[in-house]
């Protein structure tokens, strides 16, 4: 038995090397909350995703995207994506720190960061990925609470489920989890979903600053 235990221990050690806990099946991404000084006051910059994109076309988001194998870290991915999407240089991005990592109900592991942008010329986003950019004054976001709604996730067995092995198991949908969804409205734009969740985390931290 000692030999079996030793061999099993070695096999388990090999199995976990290079893996990240139970997050291997998650879509790992990184975003940047971009602060910018505009019209004499700080503001937060947002993107509207291009309608040509296959993933969430037309939705409002922060610069960012999938963490690629070539990226040295999640932060490196956030900076790279920000450069590509906003057509700015790394030297024009000052990283201020990280926000809370988010594991979304739909399988996204998100690494958010905060950065200050000081572009030397007007931002002209990549047309392939970004339909437009807009800003919301930080003062407005701090003064207005988000609309809070809720969504429900459920499970339903498919055709290959062996009902004969689990007596009495229902074929109908079963509610599994209810989670909160936030909405920030400013003029004609609505920031919601994961982007709103990241935004709220940033605003909560900003409110702790002594601005007197």
Image (cartoon, grey):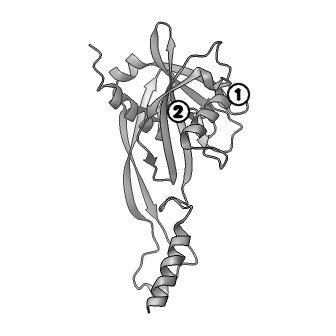
Mark 1 → mark 2, Cα distance in angstroms: 16 Å
Q: Residue furthest bottom?
A: 1
Residue 136 placement (x, y as % from top left): 47, 20
Nearest the viewer among 25 and 93 is: 93
Q: Residue 191: x and y, percent?
A: 48, 31
Image quarter where the N terminus lies is bottom left
Residue 32: give its label: 2
In the depicted view, which residue is nearer to us: 35 or 51?
A: 35
The image shows residue 141 at horizontal and vertical percentages of 39, 23
Residue 90 in picture, x, y percent from top left = 62, 26
Could you tell me which residue is drawn at 55 percent across and 49 percent down? 28
Residue at horizontal 68 percent and vertical 20 percent from the top: 124
Q: Quadrant of residue 137?
A: top left
Q: Nearer the viewer, residue 9 or 175?
A: 9
Tell me the quarter of the picture where residue 125 sits.
top right
Q: Residues within 10 Å of mark 2 (few under 14, many from 20)?
A: many
Q: Which mark is residue 126?
A: 1
* Local crowd size for mark 1, using a 10 Å CA cut-off: few (<14), some (14–19), many (≥20): some
Determine whether, in the image, residue 63 is placed left or right of residue 3: right
Residue 72, above or below 132: below
Mark positioned earlier in the residue sequence (1 or 2): 2
Nearer to us: label 1 or label 2: 2
């Amino acid at each position: 038995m000692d030999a079996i235990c030793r061999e099993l221990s070695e096999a388990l050690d090999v199995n976990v090397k290079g893996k990240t806990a139970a997050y291997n099946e998650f879509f790992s991404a990184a975003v940047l909350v971009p602060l910018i000084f505009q019209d004499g006051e700080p503001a937060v910059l947002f993107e509207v995703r291009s309608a040509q994109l296959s993933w969430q076309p037309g939705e409002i988001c922060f610069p960012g995207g999938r963490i690629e194998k070539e990226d040295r870290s999640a932060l490196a991915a956030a900076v790279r994506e920000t450069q590509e999407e906003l057509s700015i240089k790394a030297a024009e991005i000052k990283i201020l720190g990280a926000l809370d990592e988010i594991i979304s109900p739909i399988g996204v592991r998100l690494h958010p960061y905060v950065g200050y942008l000081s572009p030397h010329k007007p931002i002209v986003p990549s047309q392939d990925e970004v339909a437009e950019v807009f800003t919301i004054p930080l003062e407005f976001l701090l003064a207005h609470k988000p609309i809070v709604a809720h969504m429900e996730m459920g499970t339903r067995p498919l055709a290959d489920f062996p009902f004969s092995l689990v007596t009495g198991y229902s074929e109908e949908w079963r509610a599994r989890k209810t989670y909160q969804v936030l909405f920030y409205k400013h003029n004609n734009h609505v920031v919601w979903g994961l982007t709103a969740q990241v935004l709220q985390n940033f605003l909560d931290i900003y409110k702790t600053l002594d601005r007197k």
